Image (cartoon, rainbow, N blue to C red):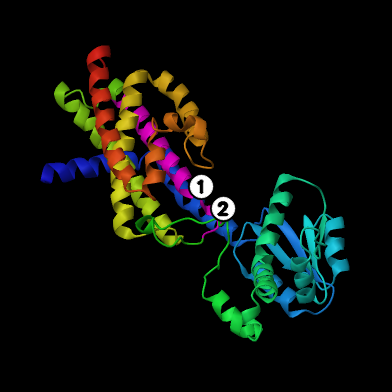
């Protein structure tokens, strides 16, 4: 134990003498704080102005629901239709949705119109593009409940005469017994421990944070691999038996990656992004082992410091593009499994990836071992 602690303190001391390593550690909280700060600001992909032509309880309810929900679309209520239209003309809003006076009556007319229905919500768009077109689906979803209620009452009145003595409130009792709450499409992230349960709302800007932290962890491991090559040149570990040098390199990697993982855990907790301490620690520990083995394998395959220095930025870019950091490229999904960040990102939502991460680590250790035998590299 004393020898282990001595090595632990010695390797830590060597790491913290490296300015580049300290900069990597400082990058982690800066990254998390930046993303969480931006996420608290107004960050909607689209801005939609909402207005009423006259006071109407139904229209007010729809506007209140839209402006209060957390969405990638920013909804803002305007005092008048003219004000909403002016925002679109000035480029301060992407579109304006103007609700009519006596909207409840318009809804019933729309429902009763059969095949030839007259639109009753005025939509003004600055330009026609895919996001604006998709936003109209949000408007349809917001009106669904009101239209479905009107359609239900209209159908009962016209086709079920035996219920003609019932009031609208009595008929609505049966309607309300069937739950139709919620959106047809919802942008959410799930708690890792509740993947099959209720999703937790989150800001879409925070989704790349874990992926970026995973890539930063690999970056720190590759930097450690470069330090190890320098140590080999300097003969730092020349007194250690050859059969034990693999464990020494693994120890160097783990000391580095565990330091980075500890800072990640603190940063995620401080930013309110940690799902649960137990699960976070387990995933970070497993990911630390995989990252260490991945960087050892890359170091051994490259062999020389110049080659590793050339490959390092390329690897970082490839992982940012191929791994599901910002988006998931389905056509490259099989290639994703070559890189550690894929397992860390997915392990947050699926226990299956914890098992896959363990298998991945074993495969990396085998490749590292065989590479040494084939290329006779230490």
| 119 drawn magenta | no
- Residue 289: image location, x then y, percent: 28, 39
- Residue furthest out toward the top: 375
Q: Which residues are magenta?
A: 202-231
Is residue 243 left or right of 138 when viewed as pictured? left
Residue 280 position (above or below residue 81)? above
Residue where numbered disc 2 is placed:
205
Query: Where does label 1 land, which residue?
Result: 208
Q: Which residue is drawn at the image coordinates 73% and 51% (left, top)?
A: 132
Q: Give whichever of 374, 14 is nearer the camera.
A: 374
Decide: marks 2, 1 in contact (CB < 8 A)? yes
Residue 173 in which image quadrant = bottom right
The furthest residue to the left? 1
Residue 335 in picture, x, y percent from top left: 43, 29
Left or right: 209 in relation to 185: left
Of residue 70 and residue 378, the one placed in the foreground of this image is 70
In the rendered image, which quarter is residue 339 located in?
top left
């Amino acid at each position: 134990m004393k020898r282990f602690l001595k090595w632990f303190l010695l390797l830590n001391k060597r790491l913290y003498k490296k300015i580049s390593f300290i900069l990597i550690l400082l990058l982690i909280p800066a990254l998390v704080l930046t993303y969480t700060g931006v996420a608290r600001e107004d960050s909607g992909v689209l801005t939609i102005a909402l207005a009423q032509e006259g006071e109407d309880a139904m229209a007010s309810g729809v506007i209140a629901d839209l402006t209060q929900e957390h969405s990638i679309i920013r909804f803002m209520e305007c005092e008048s239709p003219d004000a909403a239209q002016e925002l679109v003309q000035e480029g301060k809003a992407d579109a304006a949705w103007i609700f009519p006076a006596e909207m409840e009556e318009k809804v019933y007319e729309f429902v009763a119109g059969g095949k030839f229905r007259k639109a009753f919500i005025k939509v003004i768009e600055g330009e026609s593009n895919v996001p604006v077109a998709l936003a109209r689906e949000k408007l349809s979803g917001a009106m669904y409940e009101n239209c479905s209620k009107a359609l239900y009452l209209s159908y009962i009145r016209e086709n079920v005469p035996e219920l003609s003595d019932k009031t609208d409130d009595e008929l609505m009792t049966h309607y309300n017994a069937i739950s139709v709450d919620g959106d047809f499409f919802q942008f959410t992230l799930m708690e890792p421990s509740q993947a099959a349960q209720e999703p937790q709302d989150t800001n879409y800007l925070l989704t790349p944070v874990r992926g970026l932290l995973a890539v930063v962890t690999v970056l720190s491991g590759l930097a450690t691999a470069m330090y190890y090559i320098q140590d080999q040149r300097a003969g730092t570990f020349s007194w250690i038996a050859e059969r034990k040098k693999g464990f020494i390199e693994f120890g160097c990697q783990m000391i580095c990656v565990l330091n980075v993982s500890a800072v990640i855990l603190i940063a995620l907790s401080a930013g309110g992004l940690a799902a649960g301490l137990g699960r976070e620690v387990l995933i970070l520990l497993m990911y630390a082992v995989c990252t260490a083995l991945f960087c050892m394998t890359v170091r051994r395959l490259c062999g020389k410091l110049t080659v590793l220095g050339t490959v390092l930025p390329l690897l970082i870019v490839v992982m940012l593009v191929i791994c599901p950091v910002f988006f998931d490229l389905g056509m490259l999904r099989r290639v994703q499994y070559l890189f550690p960040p894929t397992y860390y990102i997915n392990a947050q939502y699926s226990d299956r990836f914890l098992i896959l991460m363990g298998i991945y680590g074993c495969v990396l250790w085998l490749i590292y071992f065989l590479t040494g035998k084939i290329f006779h590299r230490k």
